[in-house]
Image (cartoon, rainbow, N blue to C red):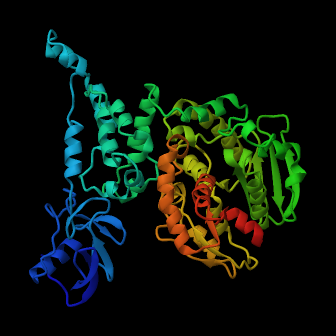
Amino acid sequence: MKNTDDLLIPIYIMRNKIFKKYMVPSDLTIIEALEYLNNSGYEIKYRSSCKAGQCGSCAVTVDGLPKLACKTKVKEDMKIEPLRNFDLIEDLVVNREEYYKAQKEFENWIHETSEVEEKDKNKNKKDTLKILSDDELFKSISDIGSVRNCIDCMSCMSTCPARMYSDYMGPTFMRLLARYARDARDNKDRVKEAFEKNLYNCTTCGRCIKVCPNNIDTVHNAVEKLRELSFKKGQYVENHLDVRKNITENPAKRTVTKPEAPKIGFLEDVIANPEKFNNEFTEKIVIENKDNINKSVEYVAKNPKATVALFTGCLMDYRLQELGMSGIRVLNAHGISVIIPINQVCCGSPLIRTGQTDVAKELKEINLAIFDKLFTDKSLDSIVTLCAGCGSTLKNDYNEKQFVVKDITELLVEKGLLKYKSCNLKVTYHDPCHLKRGQDIFEQPRIILDSIPELEFIEMEIPDQCCGAGGGVRSGKPEVAYKIGEKKTEMILETKADYVITVCPFCNYHIADCLSKVSDIPVMNIVKLLDKVI
């Protein structure tokens, strides 16, 4: 162990479900600190092997998040506990037998012959092998490279909400199945196996990505790839076809159908009745290409400092039209002109998350054509979204885009906030998964809340804990969504807040539904809150 300095700092280690205080040198890793303490006679039980971040055995929970003890430096008042959501053996040692047993049942090796061929005793094994060219082999191996670097640390398993609250095998098993499903040499039906192991219970919250020491993108490179393959094989959640039907049969290509919503959508209303959305912060309204595919309505702000195009999203268009009206007013009030392209369509997120990528591709092409041309013709700052899911999709799934995408909180903080009116409310804030982990936006909403006079902002226990609505789980596996939502509800109730604030219509709906079973606390989009204080 390296030489230690003279400065000792306090850290807290959980033993027998109680955090106990220990003094350790400040220049050590957690593993070195544990060695230091045991050399002093404390006999703390922990796992360790390589001490180089390669074996994954030393993973523990540090200040609420899983970390490799051999790679994490101690800091003052750090809290160290065993990995969560595993049975405890002693101190920092958890029982991993469940994982090893399941891994063996998954047959973690390449199956060169299919099960049918293996049973056919009359066939020569050589005849059943896949013969791959060098190019095919190279492409296959390159394709699975993104999901091969797992070190079995169990960090993703310890934080996965779907695994916590449902019969879901967990991220690393989906990664394992995706590895073989995408390997041209493997003949076993890994996609069917994933489907049977509750592939569609994953909310695509992305916690597994953020805690992975090797940055494996399990959501996009495993779960969503498996769902795409599963859908092509005819294995899907029946309710997810409703989204597909709504988009393909609705001329406006929205996930919400008109029978379930107002007779006229927000975009239709804007072009038909543009004055309806006029406000005291609007200088003038400009309508362009009214009879053209590129038609748009612009609400020009007084003394504008920027112009943006508004991506409305399906829920704003057909269910939350008042949110669209507030969005225009809030942006204009901040000196930002708003152009609304009328022929924009669903971003495709509900389809991408559920494996229906064929229709999602069509939607993407429509939006790219509209917004790329708009960016070419106009001097725009960005495409602005009022929905975390839409924003994450436009930023991360539209790789060919020529435009910049910003969440409204990101834009407002960047351009400068106003002196808002006082608001005597106590609020808490829910971080949407597709905003915090999907776009790395979490400070901006808090900056906005802290800037409102007399508003009391209280953080809940785990503000970025998934509410359960994402990944098609609310529509396809509602029992799982509500089970995950129950925990979020408990955290909200503990704050005794008057309102829950968020920036995602899907989270808004789901948290409101979960809360309605036990409380009358309302949920509000941060844009609606701003509309009240400008």
What residue is at 35 percent from the left and 30 percent from the top? 192
Which of 521/45 is in front? 521
In the image: residue 178, left or right of residue 365 = left
Q: x, y (%) of residue 381?
A: 68, 56
Which residue is situated farthest in the front direction here? 518
Residue 19: image x %, image y %? Answer: 29, 79
Q: Is residue 439 visible?
A: yes
Where is residue 230? Give x, y as percent.
Answer: 42, 31
* Residue 147 image offset from top left, x and y in percent: 32, 44
Above or below, 256 against 114 in this view is: below
Asked if residue 269 lies left or right of residue 14, the reply is right
**Residue 459 shows in the view:** no
Q: At 80% across and 44% down in the image, what residue appears?
A: 296
Residue placed most toward the observer, 86 or 23: 86
> Which residue ends up furthest to the bottom in the rendered image?
6
When asked about the image quadrant of residue 83, the answer is bottom left
Residue at the image position 29 percent from the left and 41 percent from the top: 176
